[in-house]
Image (cartoon, helix red, strand yellow):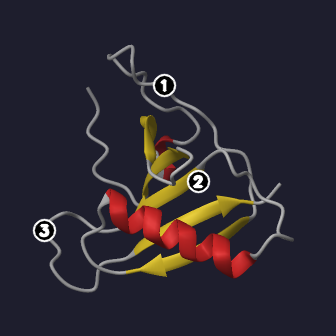
Amino acid sequence: GVGMGMTAPVSITAFPAEDGSFQQKVKVSLRIPSQFQDNPPCPTDESIKIEERQEMTIYSTQFGGYAKEADYVNYAAKLKAALGSDAAYHKDFYLCNGYDPPMKPYGRRNEVWFVKK
């Protein structure tokens, strides 16, 4: 019953298939605004969970435009190639982040994050 507004980034946890595409399983995460961090309102929908994201170090790449699954897959492949085989990061998932509302036509910001082990 509490309106919190939209926050950024909206993160989608992607679990890549062997061919690099997303598996059907994805997880969408929204940041709880600062004023609600200490005591977040309880969700009324049982499928919504409140989780605390632990501190992490990431490898990241940024790109513009209206991001689609194919864009995230493409930039994840580019980031993987740029990092080479020596970088230690979780390979079973990565985070796809969007920072802009749908009605923003120009200057959009999207990122792919690999979480360092």
- Describe the element under mark 1 as helix, strand or loop: loop
Crowd tier of the residue under label 3, counting other residues whose Cα lies within 10 Å: few below 14, some 14–19, many 20 or above: few
- Structural distance between the alpha carbons of marks 3 and 2: 26 Å
Of the residues shown, which amino acid type is indicated by label 1? Lys
- Structural distance between the alpha carbons of marks 1 and 2: 19 Å
- Residue 100 percent across, percent down from the top left: 29, 68
Residue where numbered disc 3 is placed: 103
* Above or below 16: residue 85: below
Is residue 21 toward the left or the right of residue 2 in the image? right
Say which of 108 and 24 sits in front.
Answer: 24
**Which quarter of the figure has residue 46?**
top left
Is residue 50 toward the left or the right of residue 64 in the image? right
Any mark on residue 49, and which?
1
- Residue 13 percent across, percent down from the top left: 51, 46
* Above or below 82: residue 45: above
Of the residues shown, which amino acid type is indicated by label 3? Met
Residue at point 41% right, 80% down?
63
Sequence order check, earlier mark of 1 and 2: 1
- Residue 6 percent across, percent down from the top left: 30, 53
**Which quarter of the figure has residue 78?**
bottom right
Q: Is residue 63 visible?
A: yes
| Quarter of the image where the C terminus is located | bottom right
Q: Give the number of the mark in front: 1 or 2.
A: 2
* Above or below 55: residue 24: above
Say which of 62 and 38 sits in front.
Answer: 62
**Which quarter of the figure has residue 43?**
top left
- Describe the element under mark 2 as helix, strand or loop: strand
Any mark on residue 94, and which?
2
Is residue 100 toward the left or the right of residue 31 in the image? left
Sequence order check, earlier mark of 1 and 3: 1
Any mark on residue 20, and which?
none
